[in-house]
């Protein structure tokens, strides 16, 4: 089950000390922020509005091996956070 999500309806703006990731940041940067701040999930912001959240476990599963040879580890690190979540959701639904 994918816990990460992208919500098309923005919620709140980030608080002053909140740790978050931008939707257009790369998966690699997201992992760096999670490790640096010891976070297992992060809110995702698009244009200063919360549009979802990403979970470490989902990213670890996303980075694992796939059947298609084009889906390699380095390539997946260069996905944006938003595109990685969209892809995870589609894969979980059988697309």
Image (spheres, grey):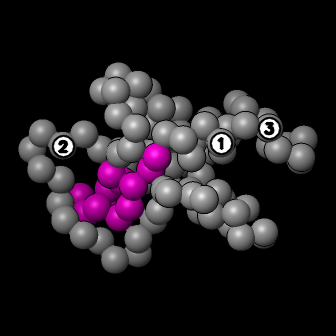
User: How packed is label 3: few (under 14 Cα within 10 Å), some, or many (20 or more)?
Assistant: few
Q: Who comes first in sequence, dot 2 or dot 3?
A: 2
* Helix, strand or loop for disc 1: helix
- Residue at the disc numbered 3: 65
The quarter holding residue 76 reads top right
Residue 21 at x, y percent in the picture? 35, 44
- Residue at the disc numbered 2: 18
* Helix, strand or loop for disc 3: loop
- Whether 48 is among the magenta residues is yes
The numbered disc on residue 61 is 1
Residue drawn at (25%, 39%), measured in percent from left and top? 19
Q: CA distance from mark 2 to mark 3?
A: 32 Å
Residue 28 at x, y percent in the picture? 53, 32
Residue contact at pointers 2 and 1, CB within 8 angstroms: no
User: How packed is label 2: few (under 14 Cα within 10 Å), some, or many (20 or more)?
Assistant: few
Q: CA distance from mark 3 to mark 1?
A: 8 Å
């Amino acid at each position: 089950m994918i816990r990460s999500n992208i919500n098309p309806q923005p919620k709140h703006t980030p608080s002053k000390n909140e740790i978050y990731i931008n939707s257009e940041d790369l998966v690699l940067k997201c992992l760096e922020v999670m490790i640096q701040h010891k976070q297992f999930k992060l809110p995702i912001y698009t244009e200063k509005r919360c549009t979802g959240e990403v979970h470490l476990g989902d990213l670890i599963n996303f980075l694992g091996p796939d059947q298609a040879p084009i889906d390699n580890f380095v390539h997946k690190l260069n996905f944006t956070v938003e595109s990685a979540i969209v892809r995870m959701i589609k894969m979980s639904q059988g697309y």
